[in-house]
Image (cartoon, grey):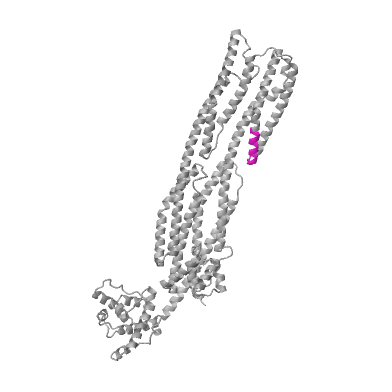
Amino acid sequence: MAIYDYEGHVDDDDVESNKDVPIDTAWELQQKKTFTAWCNAHLRNVNKQINVIENDFRDGVMLIKLLEVISGESLPGPERGMLRFHKIANVNKALDFIQSKGVKLVSIGAEDMASRKNCDEQSVMAYLSSYYHVFSGSHKTDIAATRIANNLRMIRENQNLEECYETISSNLSDWIKIKLREFGQRDPQTSVSAVEGLQQKFRLYYRQEKPSKLQEKARLETTYNTLQTRLRLNNKSPYVPANGRLITDVAKNWSSLEQADKIYEEWLLEELQRLERLEYLAKKFEVKCSTHEAWTNGKPEALASNDFRSAMLSEMRAFQKKHEAFQSDMTAHHARIEHIQALTEELNKLNHFNINAFNQRYNTIITTWDEMRKLSSQREREISKALTALEEIDQLHLDFAKRAAPFNNWMEQTEEDLRDTFIVHTMPEVERLIAAHQTFENTLDEAENESRQLQLCAQKVEEIASEYKLVNATQNPYTNIEPHVLPQRWNMIRELTQKRSALLHRERERQLANEKLRREFAQKAEAFNSSIETHRTEIVKVSMESHSSLEDQRNNLQKLEEELNRHQDKLNELEHVNQALEDAYIFENPYTVYSMPTLRVAWEQLFTLLHYSVNEIDNQILTRDSRGLTAEQMNDLRTCFKHFDKNNTGRLEPNEFKACLVSLGYNFRDDIKNQLLPLLPSFTILLNNVHYCRV
């Protein structure tokens, strides 16, 4: 700004020739005010101002500042002391600089200016104006060149920001498309290890790949906001990205990715549970089918044979009783057929990858079973016709067969149950299994008594055979169960019972440890989430509700960022506990609604909000300095913006933004509305646009 805007041109000769001419007091006062305003117009560029010329220029500090602003050059730094010789030294630096630019100094000295009584403000005014005229003429060409260079530099920087935006948005969109295709592939897996491999890959995505891309997304938004701010400050049209690369497009794609990875994670958990259930069912199917096939091995052939037709009467009676025992055994085995059928139906329902083999094996078992029933009925009718009398019946053998068959079947079923694996995830499930096992253990005394009775029966047969020397008397014609097998199997049942009990108690201890992990994670997650909410509230408070300067707000936000960085250890502790939960295959936690992915996202969003707030304040500082807004004006604008920001989001809806501008006395034109409303204007956008919306 030229001094001509404030007063007429002052020649050096006029300073000397008019020195003794009486000066009108009113005119002199007006010249002081005009010169003070001119000085403040330049000093405002460095956030400085003067009030009284003879006082503010006396120590030379403000005089040096004013000369640096006018000339664009750096002068030697002022002395820091407050003594008179420090002030004289500072004034000498300023006067030497003026004289070095070709301005002749007459009737003015550093000692005079440093003295309140001898300071000649008219001389200071004259020599400063003379220096400005000398300097402004010689620097017009340099200023024009500098402005052109600055304009070109600004264009290059904006182009670089556009290229940066295009690169980041293109890479981020391509990555999102790849991940959407990957998460869309949810083909049924064939093994638990395959699903665990997919889960491990998904964990790497959640912990490393996705946070990195989230930072890129935040950088993309920051780049976009910075570019739009720079364009508006230079009165350029807003930057419009290519179709599909808009901020809204990227946000929409990111939202689709969030939904897709959540669905994919749930599918992985369901697939893992399905495959675990299938493995359990397949093992149980194998055990039951193998047991049944072992039992039916050779049975159809034996039922179809005609060996009884050559038997004697006593042998016929043995055939009849043996067949009765067989039918009793077959009835007991019918429950296993029902179990096999139920297992086959559930395997079909869960779509086992090798279901054809299971169905084929089941059909073979059913066909064999139907054939056995038919053959058994036919054999019973034929033996009944052949048998005419039941004179001799060995009651001991018959009693043993009748009691041994169900007891043996019970032991087989019990052995299967005790060898059967169990899958539990909670303490109530373990407690139910332990209670059921204790109930079973309470019934073992009756079984023990039955075993002793059968052994006594077999011993009595041996005693009678030994006493009467009966060679074939020990052969029981009514059953294939050997007497010595029952004690062996009974001892095995006792051992399996003890092992089962120990296994259940170990599982109980493991579930107790899992409960401890769940509670520990819940406690830490609740505390960590509370800390996130507290810091989010503090960020919003500093950004939107603080009445301090923008620089203080930025410094407070930077301190908050340092404080947040110190909370990284708490997140690491949570990660450690969460890893322990995952290693223990704990997928549900009834003690908290928070999960590790939710907390990670909240943590990253907190940093995104912090960085966004810092960027907003930086843009507000840039806008304030470029517009020359005072602190009072900034507070008025901020108060108005906060009044219309009903939901405290830091952005205004279209109607809120329009009402805000109208309340400030600005007209909301259609061309400005079409450019700004899709952006959900922030406080920075309000600062950038109030100057060209005024009525």
In the figure, residue 248 lies in which quadrant? Answer: bottom right
Provide residue 229's location: percent of width, then percent of height: 49, 69
Q: In front: 39, or 513?
A: 513
* Residue 119 lies in quadrant: bottom left
Residue 342 within the magenta-colored segment of the rendering:
yes
Q: Relative to 653, does residue 423 appear above or below in the rendering?
A: above
Of the 4 image quadrants, the one containing the N terminus is bottom left
Residue 122 x %, y %: 31, 85
Horizontally, is 402 left or right of 73 in the view?
right
In the figure, is residue 103 to the left or right of 150? Answer: left
Q: Main secondary structure of the magenta part?
A: helix
Residue 608: x percent and y percent?
47, 59
| Residue 142 image offset from top left, x and y in percent | 41, 78
Question: Can residue 480 be seen in the rendering of this structure?
Answer: no
Looking at the image, which residue is at 60% across and 36% down? 281
Tell me where the magenta segment starts and ends, as one range.
339-354
Residue lying at the far right in this picture: please name it.
385
Q: Is residue 307 visible?
A: yes
The vertical placement of 593 against 163, above or below, is: above
